[in-house]
Image: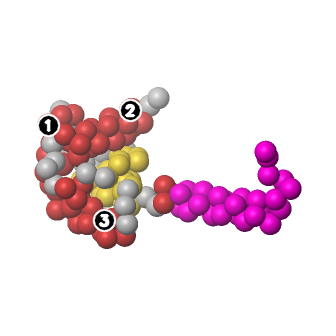
Amino acid sequence: MGRIERINQQVKREIGRILLQEMADPRLQFVTIMDADVSRDLQNARIRYSVLGKESEIQSAKKGLEGAKGMIRRLLGQSMNMRHTPDLIFIYDQSIEISARIEETLQEIHDEHETHHPDNQKE
């Protein structure tokens, strides 16, 4: 694992810890950090996150992250002891939401198939 990959993993872990342990904002309690991608020059970090909840909770979490960006960056710099702490760019990751929708659709198809073909049901 290269230097940037190690930094990415550490940034991901630390931001997750900061959100869980150091932030009192209730809008951030269902935020999960999915990935961190720090630029090679360490100036910027793209932080992909997911939120468990409805659209209103997603928007609320987005506002909460933007509002807390400075504090998260400061705490990240303290915990990682970096010469320069990257600017944080939060990006909502829809992959969990899309995956849940696919799973739901597959379950509906399965249930419909079982309803129309009862002889396939196990006893």
Which amino acid type is shown beneath numbered disc 1?
A: Gln
Is 81 left or right of 103, judged from the image as shown? left
Q: Quadrant of the C terminus?
A: top right
Is residue 108 shown in magenta? yes
Write down the residue under mark 3.
Answer: 57
Q: Residue at x 48, y 60 (%)?
A: 97
Write down the residue under mark 1.
Answer: 78
Q: x, y (%) of residue 105?
A: 63, 64
Q: 65 or 120, which lies in front?
A: 120
Work out how far the residue at label 3 is from the one at label 1, CA to CA, in angstroms: 29 Å
Picture quarter containing residue 6?
A: top left
Q: Secondary structure at mark 3?
A: helix
Q: Which segment is the magenta one?
A: 98-123
How crowded pointer 3 is (Cα within 10 Å; few <14, some 14-19, many 20+) is rated as some
Q: Residue at x 37, y 61 (%)?
A: 53
Q: 55 or 86, which lies in front?
A: 55
Determine whether label 3 and label 2 are within 8 Å by CB: no
Mark nearer the N terminus (3 vs 2): 2
